[in-house]
Amino acid sequence: MLKNLILKLLFWRASIMHKGKLPTKSENSAPKMKYDVMSGAIFWEDEGLWEINHLLADAFKHVLHHRMTLVVGSKNDVGVMRSKEFDKQIFEMAKKYFPNWIGFDASRCSYNPEVADRIMRIRKVADWRFQKLLNEEN
């Protein structure tokens, strides 16, 4: 409980500091999806999280993860960062502070079987690469 409160306060602080700084429109007609290792989630390269501040990107890991669960649908289990309820709460907080962020566009927050399949393949390759890296260390 205390850790959840601390995480919410950190997210709130990052949101206040960077309110209005995230892009609302894409300058790229076909932005690429990328994999964020810290959240285990996908983001689009035009969403501006890493360009602004790494602390904001770190704060958004729960948002990215929850959004991914919305896109891939219930048949694909992608796990949670803290809990489904907590991730959803952070997602809703982010929507409050960044309502026009391109990352909240309906096409990026709604179930899409083609995108879901692509996301699951990207995650599978990322997991394979991570396991390969771990095995090389041993």
Image: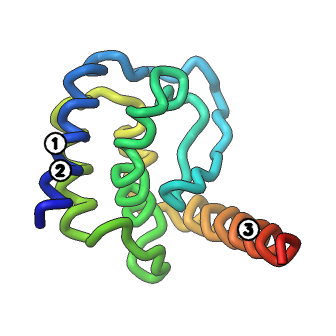
Q: Position of residue 124 (x, y in %)?
A: 69, 72
Q: Amino acid at mark 2?
A: Ile
How far, Cα to Cα, is label 3 from label 1?
Answer: 31 Å
How far, Cα to Cα, is label 2 from label 3?
Answer: 29 Å
Q: Tag 1, which secondary structure?
A: helix
3 or 1: tag closer to the N-terminus: 1
Q: Amino acid at mark 3?
A: Phe
Rendered image quadrant of residue 21: top left
Position of 97 with respect to 114 (left or right) is left
Rendered image quadrant of residue 125: bottom right
Q: Are marks 1 and 2 in contact (CB under 8 Å)?
A: yes
How far, Cα to Cα, is label 1 from label 2?
Answer: 5 Å
Q: How is the image coloured?
A: rainbow
Quickly name the residue at label 2: 6
Q: Is residue 7 above or below residue 13?
A: below
Quickly name the residue at label 3: 130
Q: Are marks 2 and 3 in contact (CB under 8 Å)?
A: no
Q: Amino acid at mark 1?
A: Leu
Position of 108 with respect to 86 (left or right) is right
Position of 60 with respect to 114 (left or right) is left
Q: Depth-wise, is mark 2 or mark 3 nearer the camera?
A: 2
Q: Quadrant of the C terminus?
A: bottom right
Q: Position of residue 42 (x, y in %)?
A: 55, 53
Q: Tag 2, which secondary structure?
A: helix
Position of 94 with respect to 30 (left or right) is left
Binning the other alpha carbons within 10 Å of mark 1 as few (below 14), some (14 to 19) or many (20 upward) gives: few
2 or 3: tag closer to the N-terminus: 2
Quickly name the residue at label 1: 9
Q: Nearer the viewer, residue 2 or 79?
A: 2
**Numbered tag placed on residue 125 in the rendering:** none
Q: What residue is shown at x 18% (from left), y 43% (from top)?
A: 93
